[in-house]
Image: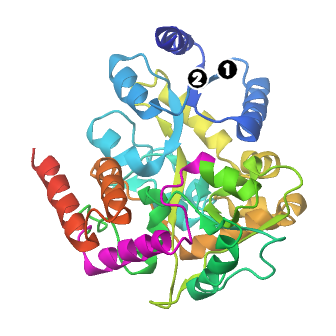
Amino acid sequence: MKWLVLALILGACSDPHGIVLWHAYNGAERSALEQTAREWNAAHPDQPLDLVAVPFDGFGDKLSSAIPRGNGPDLFIYPQDRIGDWADSNVIEPIEFWVDDARADRFRVDAMSAMAYRGSLWGLPMTIKPLALYYRTDLVAQPPRTTDELLAFVKPMRAKDGYALAYANVDLYGHAAWLHGFGGRVMDNDGTLRIATPEAAEAAAFARDLVKMGAVPDDAQAPLVTSLFNEGRAAMAMSGPWFAADIRPGVPWKVTTLPLISATHQYAAPFASAEALVMSARAHDKDAAFAVMDFLTGDAAATTRAKLAHQVVPNPIAYRDPEVAADTTLATFVRQLEHSVPLPTAPAMRMVWTPYRTALGDVFAGRAEAGQRLIDVEKELEGYLRR
């Protein structure tokens, strides 16, 4: 089946008259994107936009393989963490030539900054996705303002064989809220690794203690987080805007911003992952491709996506729409952006995820001490970078 999927993808890239865009959207996000694509096609029959849905697993590797061979799309939607790697490999096209001040000003500054790498602009932001705190209103009358208040839910939830909180704790993306809240980081703005710091060790130890005291499951990936929350076995869940679509009908819930970390008096600060609309370096008509980028990231298209897919769009004007303004969930995620950290775009970032995940697993299982294990990760990654 894999060869058939690849053949269909490559076949969709063969039309020289239109613009081909790859994406991994599903559900409401896909429907909203398709609606804006229809609007483009109605207005531009001479430059039709062809959307190709690609499974997210392996999506990045497909792009890295197909584009240099001339078999990839003209445009694609992807999180910003591989921008640096693709820019250095000449896979993607810098777009500052087309972006004037008026276009840049329609986006949040943090969203546009996430598209920058080595003095160039490499994409236009479609959506920003931080994590926030979902809570069941039948289990949590007042959401916790601090981690100490969050931990007050451990005892009553353990009595029900449940957890105060569920989140993807072994993954760096889920752990990052604690990492940044303890003052740690993955790397500096210039890409220098900052993994083995006392602050990072404290954050890992804090996350380990959550496991040890039964506040959270020992390794809760996304399906388990959803299941525990829907079944009432997790009072709270730390997740992104996409989580709302997985909450079972009838489950009473709300979402709020992440709490203050009692030990540091700093807010838990998750990564803010910006999904970008990016141009291939092999796009067959770059002017036309950018025109599509401009349309799909414009204020009208962003408003459509905010209304239909509840995306946290980076266009402030979209939030003036009455329907978008009334969306309290969206408003919460926008507030969470005040305490979030942009996902790094340096090429080294793509190498961090797996070693960091392995290290957190070792720390949570008691196989290693947090500080030494993070030293090992930094040494491992520095070895990769020297090659």
CB atoms of marks 1 and 2 within 8 Å:
yes
What residue sits right under mark 1 in the picture? 48
Under mark 1, the amino acid is Pro
Lateral position of residue 218 relative to residue 243, left or right: left
Is residue 118 visible from the viewing direction of this image?
no
Residue positioned 77% across, 52% down in the render: 247
Q: Position of residue 198 (x, y in %)?
A: 27, 80
Asked which quadrant contains residue 220, the reply is bottom right
Queried whether the magenta region covers residue 214, the answer comes back as: yes
Colouring method of the image: rainbow
Lateral position of residue 170 relative to residue 382, left or right: right
Q: Position of residue 251 (x, y in %)?
A: 84, 58
* Marking on residue 19: 2
Q: Is residue 169 above or below residue 90?
A: below
Disc 2 crowd rating (10 Å Cα; few below 14, some 14-19, many 20+) is many
Q: Position of residue 379 (x, y in %)?
A: 14, 59
Q: Is residue 133 above or below residue 167?
A: below
Alpha-carbon span between mark 1 and mark 2? 6 Å
Lateral position of residue 137 relative to residue 290, left or right: right
Asked which quadrant contains residue 161, the reply is bottom right
Under mark 2, the amino acid is Ile
- Magenta residue span: 195-223
Is residue 93 visible from the viewing direction of this image?
yes
Asked which quadrant contains residue 87, the reply is top left
Queried whether the magenta region covers residue 100, the answer comes back as: no
> Which element is circle 1 on?
loop
> Which element is circle 2 on?
strand
Judging depth in this view, the residue of 294 and 213 nearest the camera is 213
Lateral position of residue 141 relative to residue 101, left or right: right
* Marking on residue 173: none
Q: Position of residue 90 (x, y in %)?
A: 30, 34
Residue positioned 59% across, 81% down in the render: 151
